[in-house]
Amino acid sequence: MDEQTLAEVERAGTQFNAVTAMTVDRADALTAESIGRRDSGEPPRRLEGIPFAIKDVIDLVGYPTTMGSNVRSDAPAANSAPVVDRLEAAGAIPVAKTNCQEYSYGILGDESAFGRVVNPVDAALCTAGSSSGSAALVAAGAVPLALGTDTAGSVRVPAACQGVLGFKPTFGVVPVDGVFPLSQSFDTVGLFASDLGVLTTAFDVIAGDDSGKAPGRGGEPGLTGNGARTIDVSLFGGDDARARDLLRSVPDLTVTTAKGRVIGKLLDDLAPIYDFIRLYEAYEVHADLYAEHAADYQPGVAKKIEAGRDLGETEYRKQLEALADLRKRSLTVFEGADFLLTQAIDGPVIRWDEIDSGSAAKFMRYSMPFNVLGWPALTLPLPRGGAGDGPQAVQLVGRPGGDRDLLAFASRLV
């Protein structure tokens, strides 16, 4: 990796408090390998020479994984997570580990042992979390690609608040080995990017060439059985101007709200299932660490962990059964639509000094449901208005396993 790129990443990392470690040694070694391949006449790989950043809950060999916490081991990771290995094998070069909400536990991005990340769009605006630093490096133009994790919106919401692309694949399509868990029933490795083509290629790489395809579907992406594209905009309610403007570029698209009642019922049903399972699983992950180091956790994160202490395993098993049933019956949404278009967050990006007890729920309202259902979802930033306007974004959602269909359709909108 050239010195100018590394210097820019380090500069942005300092300016926006986005970097926990520069990975110069790894970058230099892989750059030398890339140059050697080129000089020997080998064809370029799919991501040859592209710098990328790694949320610091994801292992990179030779570097500690800090989790944004004082409760950690600073021993270097013995192995990289498979997602990192796959990007490197495709020629991408890791340049930094990024600051994040402690242990990924919080959507606001307000609690890290390293301090909170600064939003490159406007320092007064909340970055959201938990993958705050990865979003910031892409938003600052320091890297074109970054890894994050998404359990209730932790890729898509920071992407919306910082004006970049953020993608959460179908649950289970991308391996989560070597990634510190929050809630294994919902955890997903996701991607930030400044360009949809780069994001799509990176998804192909981390998922594997044959992963993420819609089962039993062929032909052109985004087609219903009768050959017509259909998108449901029910979740926009009366505020559909952004939806109309975005979809105007796809004249052969059918826009519908036919599944509004079905989607609304799903939203009502899934929130309590998510709350119980996430609280239970997160406490199980942290029980031993928390027993020994409770005072070293960030206060808000400690409070969330405590909230899962007394939840019973019997009820947890019942909630897992309810989750499986919900995921099965939710597929009726796609009987009348190929995709859904929703708001990315509920309302404008919140300022740091305006955060209150309801802010987290507004951030997660349109992201968390698709972690529960396991469907792929992409945050698309919209063109900004005046200089004082904060970022605006929408969320495009596809059927489970239809990741590539979703990304192919998105390419018609950007």
Image (cartoon, rainbow, N blue to C red):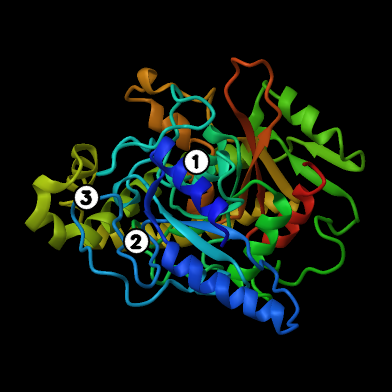
**Residue type at tag 1:** Ala
Which mark, by number, is residue 308? 3
Tell me the SS state at disc 2. loop
**Amino acid type indicated by mark 2:** Pro
- Residue type (three-letter) at the residue carrying disc 3: Gly
Camera-nearest label, 3 or 1: 1
- Rate crowding at label 2 as few (under 14), some (14 to 19) or many (20 or more) other CA atoms within 10 Å: many
In this rendering, does residue 110 appear at all? yes
Q: Are marks 3 and 1 in contact (CB under 8 Å)?
A: no
Residue drawn at (48%, 52%) of the image: 372
Marking on residue 267: none
Q: Which residue is mark 1?
A: 136
Where residue 123 sits in the image (x, y, percent)?
Answer: 45, 25
Count the marks: how many? 3
Image location of residue 157, percent across then percent down: 51, 39
Residue 78 x, y percent position in the rendering: 32, 77
Instruction: Quadrant for the C terminus, please.
Output: top right
Mark 1 lies on a secondary structure that is helix
Quick one: label 3 or label 1, which is nearer the N terminus? 1
Residue 357, image quadrant: top left
Q: Residues within 10 Å of mark 1 (few under 14, many from 20)?
A: many
- Given residues 144 and 37, the one toward you in this image is 37
Task: Answer yes or no: is residue 369 visible.
Answer: no
Left or right of 68 in this view: 81: right
Per the rendering, the mark at residue 181 is 2
> Which residue is depicted at the point 83% across and 56% down?
224
Is 293 situated above or below 160?
Answer: below
Q: Position of residue 367 (x, y in %)?
A: 52, 42
Q: Secondary structure at mark 3?
A: loop
| Chain-order first, disc 3 or disc 2 | 2
Q: Nearer the viewer, residue 247 or 195?
A: 195
